[in-house]
Amino acid sequence: MKSSSTVTSMAELVLGRELTDADHSTTVKALAIREARALMARGTAEQRARGAVPAQDGAVWEQPDEYRQGIYATAWFKSLDRARHRAYLRHHVTVPPDGLPDGHVLLDADQHPEVLAYWVQRLAAGLDTKQHLVAFGNVGSGKTAALIALGSLAVSAGVMTRYVRHGDYVRWLRPDGAPPGLTQLQVREFHDRAGLLILDELCGEMDGQATEAVRQATGDLLSARIASGLPTAIGTNLHSAQIAKILGDRIVSRLGESATALQFVRPDRRQPVRW
């Protein structure tokens, strides 16, 4: 995996306005330190591959410093704010170090918390794992809550993580469609380069079809992440055959080649009134 050593671009930290102007000089220093650590980590990994460094010396992954952890948390919260999904932060994969806050809950057993915790553990440690994770199932079965809990755990483990709904992402790439404070270039860069991208509601708003522009944008995003070795966690109400009819067989094939699939089967948790 490359997520642990990917260097966040200056565009993401400064042009994205996720830091104040006063932080600029400190950001330059933090990036320089991060680059140096990334080079050291890569060297250690290569040494281990040659057998020069015993595996028990410890994982390549290094917990980020407080400053960088703050950057990751800010990016994560902002991505949830854009989706209006802050309320989902009450869900957790595991009990936080300081305990479970009032009103917060752990995921249910049928939301696969053990699998999610193991997946994040291996991701943060830089260990080999299936590159993508697909959460699929019926509406209201708890997929989004599980994916956001996964994202929060990944951030706490030192992984730059972002959340976006598929429909929002492709809409933001339209002319003048980017959210306030972002450009189309930044939209692409933020989601192409995130250490972990949570792409929710895949094909959820497309009514069985998609334009060529949507297929191209989705294919470009996933191809960029696959080429960079970056993991993507996907949520969808559709089976792979249904997604293939909308986005094409090529995208589904590339996802399925390196994905762990988790099925969510619980009835609609929202218990909506039917009429």
Image: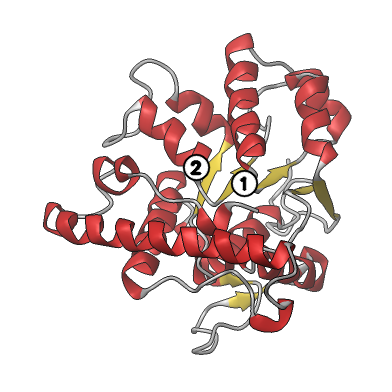
> Where residue 243 sits in the image (x, y, percent)?
79, 28
Q: Is disc 1 placed on a helix, strand or loop?
A: loop
Give the total of numbered labels. Answer: 2
Position of 225 relative to 103 (above/below): above
- Using the rendered view, name the quadrant where residue 115 is placed: bottom right
Residue closest to the far left: 22
Q: Mark 2 points at which residue?
A: 193
- Using the rendered view, name the quadrant where residue 247 is placed: top right
Residue 21 appears left or right of 176: left
Is residue 14 visible in this depiction of the protein?
yes
Q: Which residue is drawn at 56% across and 30% down?
A: 167
> Where residue 22 sits in the image (x, y, percent)?
11, 57
Residue closest to the far bottom: 98
Quadrant containing the C terminus is top right
Is residue 178 visible in this depiction of the protein?
no
**Category of crowding for the residue at label 2, using alpha-carbon neighbours closer than 10 angstroms: few (below 14), some (14–19), many (at least 20):** many
- Looking at numbered disc 2 in the image, what kind of residue is underneath it? Arg
Q: Mark 1 points at which residue?
A: 230
- Looking at numbered disc 1 in the image, what kind of residue is underneath it? Leu
> Where residue 195 sits in the image (x, y, percent)?
54, 52
Residue closest to the eye, 126 or 175: 126
Circles 1, 2 touching at the beta carbon (< 8 Å) = yes
Position of 167 relative to 159 (above/below): above
